[in-house]
Amino acid sequence: MAIRNMRTEGDEILSKKSRPVEVFDQKLWDLLDDMKETMAEHNGVGLAGVQVGYLRRLFIVDVGDGVVEFINPQILETSGEQFVVEGCLSFPGKWGMARRPAHVKARAQDRNGNWFEIEGDDLMAQAICHEYDHLDGIVFLDRIERRLTEEELKEL
Ligand code: CO
């Protein structure tokens, strides 16, 4: 496994749309393993392929109970609302307040290509929506209603 180079603010790849994953092979598994290591190194909750320069529709999420891999994900249902602090590994030091669904139901393929359904609340719902946005070239700064102030950042 290896740490991959994080694409950050100003890199135009972050605004590009990712294409579907078509091949489920060792190269994909190596990428997912590297993404896991890269996310852990940066203490992240989620990481999309595009953030390490790979323009395919996949992301990983870990809200504290293990990494879930989402390949070719679809958001099936959203409900409720939460107004939450949000950041992104590609925008280090920047935080804002985002309005996200409180509950999300999604489906995706696993690393072997098998479809599964997953439901998430709170942080999981926020993370799925945030990472899904990356696949369409949308970054969290496009979603936040306001940036956090210096004072609020200190409290964080
Ligand atoms: Co992000």
Image: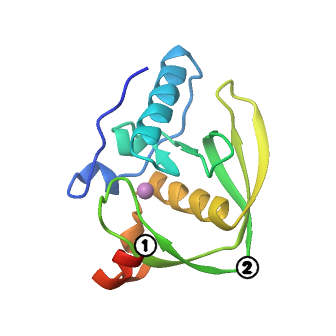
- Residue 90 lies left or right of residue 126; in this view the side is left
Q: Secondary structure at mark 1?
A: loop
Which amino acid type corresponds to the residue marked 1 in the rendered image? Leu
> Residue at the location (30% across, 58% down)?
92
* Colouring style: rainbow
Q: Quadrant of the C terminus?
A: bottom left
Q: Ligand 1 is located in which of the four quadrants?
A: bottom left
| Quarter assignment of residue 102 | bottom right
x and y percentages locating residue 133 in the rendered image: 49, 60
Q: Which residue is mark 2?
A: 80
Residue 80 locus on image (x, y percent): 73, 79
Task: State the residue at coordinates (33%, 38%).
Answer: 53
Mark 1, ligand 1, within 8 Å: the answer is: no
Q: Secondary structure at mark 2?
A: loop
- Compare residues 86 and 22 and report the one nearer the observer: 86
Q: Is mark 2 within 8 Å of ligand 1?
A: no
Q: Which residue is mark 1?
A: 156
What amino acid does circle 2 point to? Gly
Residue extending farthest to the top is: 26
**Which residue is at 48% across, 51% downward?**
135
56 vs 144, nearest the viewer: 144
Given residues 10 and 39, the one toward you in this image is 39
Q: Quadrant of the N terminus?
A: top left
Spatial separation of the CA atoms under disc 2 and disc 1:
25 Å
Residue depicted at 51% across the width and 50% down the height: 46
Residues at discs 2 and 1 in contact (Cβ within 8 Å):
no
The mark tally for this picture is 2
Sequence-wise first label, 2 or 1: 2
Residue 88 x, y percent position in the rendering: 40, 59
Q: Is residue 16 left or right of residue 37?
A: left
Disc 1 packing (10 Å; few <14; some 14–19; many ≥20): few
Q: Position of residue 38 (x, y in %)?
A: 41, 36
